[in-house]
Amino acid sequence: MRTPESKAKRWGIALGSAMFLALLGDARVAHADPTSAVPAAVRDALGAEAQADFDRGAQLFRQGQTSEAREAFLAAYERSNEPRVLFNVAVCDKQLGHHSQAIATLKRSLATADRPLPREYIERTAEAIATLRHYVATVTVDPSVGGAVVRIDGEVIRENPADVDAGSHVVTASKGGFETATATVAVKPGDASRISLQLTPSSSPGTARISCVGEPTCELRIGDEVLGRGTVSVSRTNGSYLVRAFSSGRLWSERRVEMTNGVAIDVALIGAPLPVAHIRITTDRADDSVTIDGVRAGKSGIETEVAPGEHRVIIARSGGESRTIDVLLRDNETRDLRVSLEEKRTGVSPWWFVTGGVVLAAATTAVVVVATRPTTFEGNAAGTLNPYVVTASVRPGVAR
């Protein structure tokens, strides 16, 4: 009576012989049904480049370079998508002592065909899988948490129970929000082992990589905390957080993000283009300073982008007077202000309001000229008032 072990040995010898037949593309390895359109010889089903890889694999295998032969056969398969080439890859796996991998390769051969395989090939491959099982053990992994990813020796298992070679193996189960559970198992051929892995909630903060799509210099914040510009990474414990992105000091996008301990996520903020307006301030001296909404903007001749709406502009001259002008800008409007300043301060600080080219002035002791170049405006209802120069003055002594 033949034992399973003797059958395995016989199959190992037979498979070695079959390998050489497969290397040659012999019909006895991949014999087609009489009515099948599949070429009888494997090699005949390959294109020129795949045939070259196939022949190189055959030569390397004959020379005892099994690992290199396996790579050549894989290259032939990837070029041709001919599943029968994987039979040769499986033989290389078996020759290298990777019996469980040989089984997986043969299963892949049967599962990836885009056309009917020859009946004889299917039968031969099924027999090979059954015989290889005498060289392997099976391991069933039971994680305590559903949806956990199970790995054996670092490789994600596709089937549970999983085929493994004889020896010692490291088994892990992982899931976001939990600490990874690990166990070691030693098996012999024919063993059927079962392992339970207990996952515990993670105590490590979650991490988030936050970026702005289409706005690479955005300023990122969580609540009132400024995280930085561009792309930032943060750590937070379990909770809900409001992430906001600002462009040119204005809110550009925001999104509520759920952070979970032990979980790494990517957060991409997407916002619509912000409406903008432009303003240029020029005086008769290049060193006059310009402040817009309390922020130093530069010196005379400054041109800057601002949000549509009302803005307070202060132009100051060292040792001389200063002017405060309130400007109302619409979406896509461009305003060019030209301001004349006195060399000496008058002690009175008039204010100005400019909208659509109109200038209103409070009491002042001097005639002040604010010149506006024609406003360009691309929005709706631009208005009709658009003077080139508006002179505003009042008699001295009028109360403010």
Image: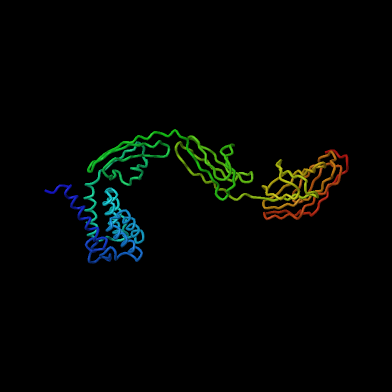
Q: Residue 73: x percent and y percent?
A: 32, 58
Between residues 293 and 229, which one lies in front from this camera angle? Answer: 229
Between residues 308 and 315, which one lies in front from this camera angle? Answer: 315
Which quadrant would the C terminus be assigned to in this image?
A: top right
Q: Residue 306: x percent and y percent?
A: 68, 47
Residue at the extreme right:
396
Which quadrant holds residue 183?
A: top left
Report the side of 374 relative to 157 (left or right).
Answer: right
- Colour basis: rainbow
Q: Residue, x 36% and y 64% (percent of image)?
A: 49
Residue at the extreme left:
1
Residue at the extreme front:
63
Report the side of 202 relative to 226 (left or right).
Answer: left
Total residue callouts: 0
Q: Residue 125: x percent and y percent?
A: 24, 55
Q: Is 353 located above or below residue 55 in the figure?
A: above
Q: Residue 327: x percent and y percent?
A: 74, 46
